[in-house]
Amino acid sequence: MSYSKKDEDGDTAIMRVDRTSVFQEARLFNSSPIQPRRCRVLLTKIALLLYTGEKFPTNEATTLFFGISKLFQNKDASLRQVVHLIIKELAHSAEDIIMVTSTIMKDTGGGTDAIYRPNAIRALCRIIDASTVQSIERVMKTAIVDKNPSVSSAALISSYHLLPIARDVVRRWQSETQEAATATKSSGGFSLGFSTSSSQTPVNNSTMTQYHAIGLLYQMRMHDRMALVKMVQQFGAAGAVKSPAATVMLVRLAAQLAEEDQQLRRPMMQLLDGWLRHKSEMVNFEAAKAICDMRDVTDAEGCH
């Protein structure tokens, strides 16, 4: 897609935005037919305001929210992607947001190549409350084990954010989370979704899903020490974890368990010793730091 002088002028206009003018421009969302390109530019302005700390009053946020929800009538995938993003951000300040739940739920199960699915999942988990989490359980379980790493990670991170309001419900998703942690996602890696052409999607394995899954498993099991020990031993095995970030998390957890329980010190120290020779330098440094910070390290434990 070529970048023209017209696009450059649009970029300059985006940098000069204020809440009042953007709110007045929002009448565009009520126009017929819907103009996807102009709406995306306006949605980008709203995003710029929200991400730079601007707060819309409740009445304005609600008006914007329901004006933007009318854009679901258009099938443009790029437009829907941005719509979900802004709805997620406005959910904190708008009222009666639960009314768009069914529409967003449909987008979470769109086609396998739909670029807006991850954003739809994030938006869905922002607009529901504790009393309605159970109604999206099937959607979330399916998304967690999705072959697309972007979709799976979006579901895992959203589950993490749901824990404070629905821990008992989210904990029922442990089997799916465990599956996500052990599976290899290779259906195109992460994509920002600016292209609808599958030929332009980067073909590489994504290890971020594994990192997110192990992090969620920890949150689910943090009050069950034996479950944590089993998790560290399972994923601490050679080759079990491909993500260096996930391994760093396991290093910290192993060090914590070793400090809290003397009976676990020996097996956890053995794991830490093994991670000193991990192929990732960030894991090496984290393991070395954990051992150095350990209290009462013996010569045998620290001589490596």
Image (cartoon, rainbow, N blue to C red):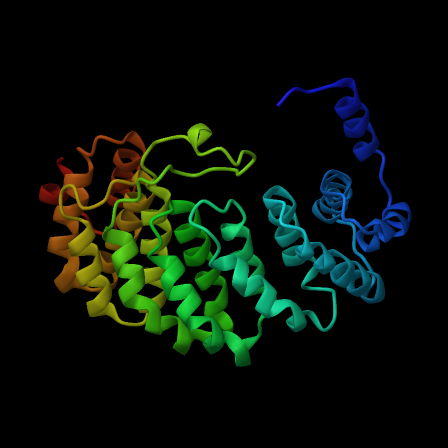
Q: Residue furthest left?
A: 300
Q: Between residue 112 and residue 93, name the one nearer to us.
A: 112
Locate the C terminus and report the quarter of the image it occupies.
top left
Say if 104 sits above or below 247 in the image: below
Q: Quadrant of residue 199?
A: top left
The reply to whether residue 222 is visible in this rendering is no
Q: Is 72 left or right of 229, judged from the image as shown?
A: right
Horizontal side of 122 relative to 216 (left or right) equals: right
- The picture places residue 203, in percent across and down from the top left corner, at 35, 31
Residue 8, quarter of the rendered image: top right
Residue under the image location 62 percent in, 23 percent down: 1
Residue 282 placement (x, y as % from top left): 32, 34
Residue 247 appears at what percent x and percent y?
Answer: 27, 44
- Pinpoint residue 161: horizontal percent, then vertical percent: 50, 63
Q: Is residue 284 visible?
A: yes
Above or below, comparing residue 138 to residue 145 in the picture: below
| Residue that sits furthest to the bottom in the current view | 131
Residue 131, compared with residue 103, is above or below; it is below
User: Which residue is at 79% across, 29% downward?
Assistant: 10
Total residue callouts: 0
- In front here: 285 or 82? 82
**What residue is at 53 percent from the left and 78 percent from the top?**
132
